């Protein structure tokens, strides 16, 4: 199998790309659609001052989808005011294909952009703007890929899903999983992977550890209990745990094969001549397949508590981010179909909403246009070449999984 990237011309010549109707249904052109979505702020942040609603983005998507025959539902996310999932379906029956993307973005760096992040700007065959790669453009491309199909032509339904808050709490995908209502049998999540299918990725949890002691004059350590000394013991414990994880769960398919524990933030004490009474550490743990968020968090808390059990110090644990389990690689017709077209499959260290879909029994592949290297930074962009490739590949997947009538055999 060739290991080169597939081109739009290759795909147009593929038997996948059977056009259902002679004319495209009416939609704005792609750049206008992307510009409309980019112009609507939908920042998801754990800082309330930065957080915003995604409703307007969902409303634009819903209007376009209704215009090409989809039945559209706007679903409030419980406990998250102003946050919505959009679910749109074309055709009847069970299972079928889901094309999913999150409708939110990260915050932006004020003054760091070469152009307004909320105005989609075309330069050198690229579209710049907040969310162009991660990942509003995928939602526009999914709609454009769907416009050639009608409900009558489908043997299995096509579903488009836009979720809320992926960049902070993943509350949108979590709500979907908690509903236990599977929207389809197969799902492509359009995170920016350069249109290379990702079949497994690491999980993540974020934890705060607060050690409390007693202050006193630094001239006599016996006058207090130093929380910084306790935190040094905590860090030693975490490093030993990371080594244990590496021995048990190393996965060579990842660029970083071992599970990692990152010490991201620490604060303690207030003056050199005082014994530190409190110290707080925030960590990020990246989990490999075979690990779960629940088991990892419980083990981490147990080991730290045991280390400080006889120190005279108190320890408190804070759940900073509940976490996402790893996406465990799964062989199936969707992965095989994507791999046959692209000539590749990959494992990545970042995490996505994929495990929530996998928990519903859905075969899950992460594949979308653009690069993760452009995400979460100024001058984010999507190349129009990647956009063309994405639209063609999605058209092919719709035909195979929603029209052809049998997804059991990969091409």
Image (cartoon, rainbow, N blue to C red):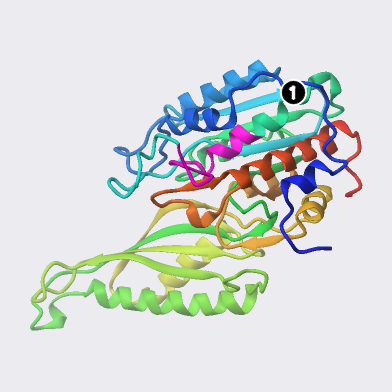
Can you say whether 22 is above or below 386 in the image?
A: above
Q: Residue at x 66, y 18 (%)?
A: 26
Crowding near the residue tagged with mark 1, few <14, some 14–19, many ≥20 C-alpha atoms within 10 Å: many
Q: Nearer the viewer, residue 11 or 285?
A: 11
Closer-to-camera residue (115/313): 115
Q: Position of residue 13 (x, y in %)?
A: 84, 43
> Does the magenta-highlighted stretch encompass residue 312?
no
The answer to whether one can see residue 178 in this image is: no
Q: Is residue 69 left or right of residue 190?
A: right
Q: Is residue 305 left or right of residue 223?
A: right
Which residue is pictured at 73% across the width and 50% down the height? Answer: 7
| Residue at left offset 59%, top offset 43% | 384
Q: What residue is shown at x 42% (from left), y 30% (from top)? A: 39
Can you give x and y, in whole percent of width and height, for residue 411 in the image? 89, 49
Q: Position of residue 240 (x, y in %)?
A: 48, 80
Residue position for label 1: 90
| Element on which disc 1 rests | strand
Q: In the rendered view, would you say 31 is above or below 381?
A: above
Residue 125 drawn in magenta:
yes
Rendered view: 170 above or below 299: above
* Quadrant where the N terminus is found in the figure: bottom right
Q: Which residues are magenta?
A: 121-141
Residue 131, position as x, y percentages in the image: 48, 41
Residue 67 shows in this picture? yes
Give the number of marks: 1
Rendered image quadrant of residue 121: top left
Residue 47 versus residue 109: which sits nearer the camera? 109
Q: Residue 30's quadrant in the figure?
A: top right
In the drawing, does residue 224 fall left or right of residue 341?
left
Is residue 130 left or right of 323 when viewed as pictured? Answer: left
């Amino acid at each position: 199998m060739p290991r080169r990237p597939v081109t739009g011309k290759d795909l147009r010549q593929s038997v996948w790309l059977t056009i259902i109707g002679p004319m495209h249904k009416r939609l704005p052109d792609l750049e206008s659609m992307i510009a409309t979505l980019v112009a609507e702020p939908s920042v998801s942040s754990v800082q309330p001052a930065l957080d915003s609603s995604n409703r307007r983005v969902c409303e634009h998507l819903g209007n376009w989808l209704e215009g090409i025959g989809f039945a559209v539902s706007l679903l409030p996310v419980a406990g998250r005011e102003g946050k919505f999932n959009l679910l749109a379906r074309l055709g009847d029956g069970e299972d079928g294909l889901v094309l999913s993307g999150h409708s939110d973005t990260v915050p932006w760096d004020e003054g760091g952009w070469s152009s307004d992040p909320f105005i989609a700007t075309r330069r050198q065959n690229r579209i710049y703007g907040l969310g162009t790669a991660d990942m509003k453009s995928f939602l526009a491309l999914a709609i454009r890929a769907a416009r050639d199909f009608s409900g009558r032509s489908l043997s299995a339904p096509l579903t488009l899903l836009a979720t809320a808050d992926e960049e902070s709490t993943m509350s949108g995908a979590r709500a979907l999983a908690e509903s236990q209502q599977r929207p389809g049998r197969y799902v492509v999540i359009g995170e920016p992977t350069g249109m290379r299918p990702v079949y497994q990725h690491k999980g993540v949890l974020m934890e705060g550890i607060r050690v409390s002691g007693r202050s006193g004059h630094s001239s006599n350590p016996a006058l207090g209990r130093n929380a910084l000394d306790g935190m040094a013991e905590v860090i030693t414990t975490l490093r030993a745990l990371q080594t244990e994880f590496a021995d048990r769960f190393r996965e060579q398919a990842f660029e970083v094969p071992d599970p990692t524990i990152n010490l991201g933030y620490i604060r303690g004490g207030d003056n050199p001549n005082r014994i530190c009474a409190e110290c707080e550490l925030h960590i990020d743990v990246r989990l490999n397949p075979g690990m779960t968020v629940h088991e990892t968090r419980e083990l981490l808390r147990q080991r730290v508590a045991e280390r400080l059990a006889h120190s005279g110090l108190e320890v408190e644990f804070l759940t900073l981010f509940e976490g996402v389990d790893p996406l465990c690689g799964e062989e199936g017709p969707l992965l095989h179909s994507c791999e046959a077209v692209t000539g590749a499959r990959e494992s990545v260290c970042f995490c996505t909403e994929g495990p929530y879909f996998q928990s519903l029994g859905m075969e899950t592949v992460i594949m979308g246009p653009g690069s993760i290297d452009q995400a979460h930074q100024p001058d984010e962009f999507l190349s129009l070449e990647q956009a063309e490739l994405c639209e063609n590949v999605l058209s092919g997947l719709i035909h195979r999984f929603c029209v052809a009538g049998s997804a059991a055999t990969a091409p």
